[in-house]
Amino acid sequence: MTATMIESILIANRGEIALRIHRACREMGIHTVAVHSTADAEAMHVRLADESVCIGPPPARDSYLNVPAIIAAAEITGTDAIHPGYGFLSENARFAEIVEEHGFTFIGPSADHIRMMGDKIAAKGTFRDLGIPVVPGSDGPVEDEGAALATAREMGFPVMIKATAGGGGKGMKRVDSAEQLAEALSIARGEAMASFGSDEVYVEKFLTHPRHIEVQILADTHGGVIHLGERDCSLQRRHQKILEETPSPALNPEEREQICRLVTSAIAQLGYRGAGTIEFLYEDGAFHFIEMNTRLQVEHPISEMVSGVDIVREQIRIAAGLELAYRQEDITLSGHAIECRINAEHPETFAAAPGRVRDYHPPGGLRVRVDSALYAGYRVPAHYDSLISKLIVLGANRNECLMRLRRALEEYVIEGIQTTIPLHRRLIAEPDFVNGDYDIHWLENWIEGTT
Ligand code: MV4
């Protein structure tokens, strides 16, 4: 593979992730182009970029999802490459194709790999064939109620009906008994059709108390593949992650080494390119693959903190046809990192709380990182995701990490809008959390019991 010169990158995103990508570009001497909606004219990502282009009105479908406007912005500014960030167009295979058809470099995997992982049945089959343990299930779409029932009886109830085109919690239905199956199947199909334009579904054994553990990988176009360990993302509310940590308190070093090596080998055999995350449900000492994400993830900084690897820099190097700057043996995962997602939301009701930030004082000090596009006087728009900041801290071990996190959360001042900082202050004082004793259901139960 020959190297492609990347001298200028259009960042097809907003908020903290647009800043994150801009920072990597700056340190690499790469020119940046921001795109923004009319609601974001005063946004920090626009202020920091070398150039900016307004691509449409506030609704995302008219701006950050507006493919012709983004391609036109890249053409007008003469950029070499487009980084999609997360969300928006980041896992849209057709967008990746269009970018390349217009002669730009897409900073991400091939459109074929994005498409493959977007089809959850295809993804499962691919990883199963590569020796990765998957959740037992129908191993393909279920054609009708009879087929679904046969699979369910084989697995034993409860089972989960999932949309082939789903992911991230959309289009799923738990079924506890044969009597519930027909209705659940028809609801799941209807929801899948409405959300994804396909009513294809599959059936899996329902795992009752798993943890969500995901492995971060990077793969170049020269056969180089590395992992940066795992992240435990079990603390979620309505499929929105609230706090992530690495390493997972649930794994011992042998389990970690085994799953990370298995994943690295599978990714190498796939010929995958770019950053990726392989998601597992982990229950009773066993891993079960569920999905692969083909984008940079919100929680990538905790992996950067323990590994020292700049994941965005490596994404850009990979897209330029360069080799990864690291081999696995160059990487030492050391210490413990936690990320708190801070949202512009009421800390108890989770009602969206956009508005003007009156005063702003982020925490600092040793091993404290704040990824945020906030500034004093900024008005958080109501049109987009409520994530306004990520507080990431590193400690020599989990206890030191928790002490530092408590200190940093105490320091953090965001005045004028409601945020989830008070939720995080309460959460990290909970004995179950302090003990690392939680599964994917723990947070919602705790919120229900304490608010
Ligand atoms: C499951 C499951 C239990 N059993 N699959 C939710 C998001 C999607 N990526 C997969 N999800 C789940 N799949 C089987 N076979 C439970 C969930 C699930 C979940 C997973 C990860 C983190 C939080 C979750 C909350 C509810 C349900």
Image (spheres, helix red, strand yellow):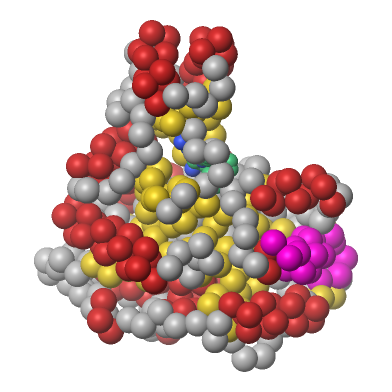
Residue plotted at (84% across, 52% down)? 450
Q: How many badges with numbers are in the image? A: 0
Classify 329 as above or below 442.
below
Residue plotted at (39% across, 50% down)? 287
Tell me where residue 415 sits by quadrant.
Answer: bottom right
Does the image show residue 206? Answer: yes
Classify 418 as above or below 136.
below
Front-lying residue, 216 or 174: 174
Q: Is residue 414 left or right of residue 227?
A: right
Front-lying residue, 368 or 208: 208
x and y, in percent, of residue 155 in the image: 40, 26
x and y, in percent, of residue 54 in the image: 57, 56
Q: Is residue 428 left or right of residue 325?
A: right
Q: Quadrant of the N terminus?
A: bottom left
Tell me where residue 347 sits by quadrant.
Answer: bottom right
The single residue placed furthest to the left in the displayed view is 1
Residue plotted at (21% across, 60% down)? 265
Does the image show residue 31? Answer: no
x and y, in percent, of residue 264 in the image: 26, 62
Residue plotted at (55% across, 82% down)? 397
The single residue placed furthest to the bottom in the displayed view is 366
Residue span colored magenta: 414-432
Classify 35 as above or below 184.
below
x and y, in percent, of residue 47 in the image: 61, 73
Front-lying residue, 2 or 400: 400
Residue 423 falls within the magenta-colored stretch = yes
Residue 114 falls within the magenta-colored stretch = no
